[in-house]
Image (cartoon, grey):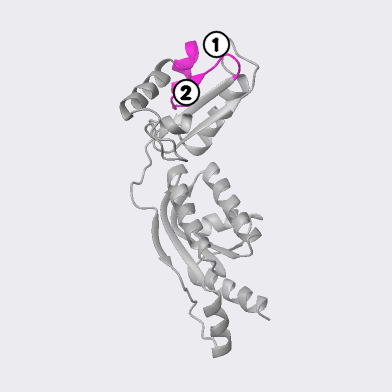
Amino acid sequence: MAATLATGGLNPVTGERVVSQLVATRTLAVMATCGMYDGAGEWLLNVGLPAKSGVAGGLIACSPGRFGVAVYSPPLDAEGNSVRGVAALTEMSSRYALHLMHVPVHMTATVTDTVRAARSGREHDPARTAVLDARPIVVIGAQGDLEFTETEQLLAAVERAAEAAPGAIVLDLTAVTAVGAGPATMVEGTLKDLERRGLRVAVAVQQPFLDQVDGPPGRWTATRDEAVAWCEDRLLEDAG
């Protein structure tokens, strides 16, 4: 139901309209102002998401236009809200910058380009070229600050690319200026999933980010060309 309210009254799975847009909007407004009983003011200040608590330990919250989430843990605080549920959603909101009043610094498009048969600047003989033609390398470029919504857009582009079953995927993040802790976890999880699916993965980032990299999946480089070249070498190795 949280997801249905977040999408304006439409069930996000079936597309069925459950309540009108007006009802969904007003319900979210009531949730934001008093859905957490006497803790509503502190909740809106710290979490910033319309929410409704039940005195059995259930709690739903909505990010309008993005998602709904439900948590459940019976131990309650003095206001009748789930202690662990409040703690979990407070952490989630902070980590992924989900507060309704939070506005990203940069309002530009996140995904800048997608190259579906990328090559490095190196020359290859016909046999190697044939191998790379059969397992193309897809490059996806991004820019700006990666917060929750921006990271969702980037990872949606990655998933669309992965559906075409390429040999490798390169994320060109050299124009990315900041990555939050939560979005970094989202990216890492996606890279691990791509590797589990048998894809080679490389990431190009600015040098300050590269200096902080310590053991995430994939190959991390300072330039797009280096990332593509690394993928080419791995694909050629895989082909023997």
**Marks 1 and 2, how far apart in space?**
14 Å
Residue 195 appears in the picture as rendered? yes
Q: Amino acid at mark 1?
A: Glu
Q: Position of residue 44 (x, y in %)?
A: 44, 22
Q: What residue would you read off at disc 1?
A: 79
Closer to the chain start, of discs 1 and 2, is: 2
- Amino acid under label 2? Ala
Q: Nearer the viewer, mark 1 or mark 2?
A: 2
Q: Is residue 46 magenta?
A: yes
Residue 194 place in picture, x, y as percent = 60, 59
Disc 1 and disc 2 in contact, CB within 8 angstroms:
no
Tell me where the magenta segment starts and ends, as one range. 35-57
Residue 33 position, x and y percent, is: 40, 17
Name the residue: 59% across, 24% down.
85
Residue at the (34%, 24%) spot, across then down:
23
The disc at residue 51 is 2
Crowd band around label 2 with a 10 angstrom C-alpha radius: few (<14), some (14–19), many (20+) = many
Callout 1 crowding tier (Cα within 10 Å): few <14, some 14–19, many ≥20:
some
- The one nearer the camera, 73 or 202, is 73
Q: Is residue 226 above or below residue 204?
A: below
At x 39% / y 53%, what residue is drawn?
Answer: 110
Mark 2 secondary-structure assignment: strand
Up/down of 110 relative to 138, above or below: above
Position of 95 relative to 185 (above/below): above
Q: Residue at x 33, y 28 (%)?
A: 20
Q: Position of residue 21 (x, y in %)?
A: 32, 30
Residue 63 in view: no
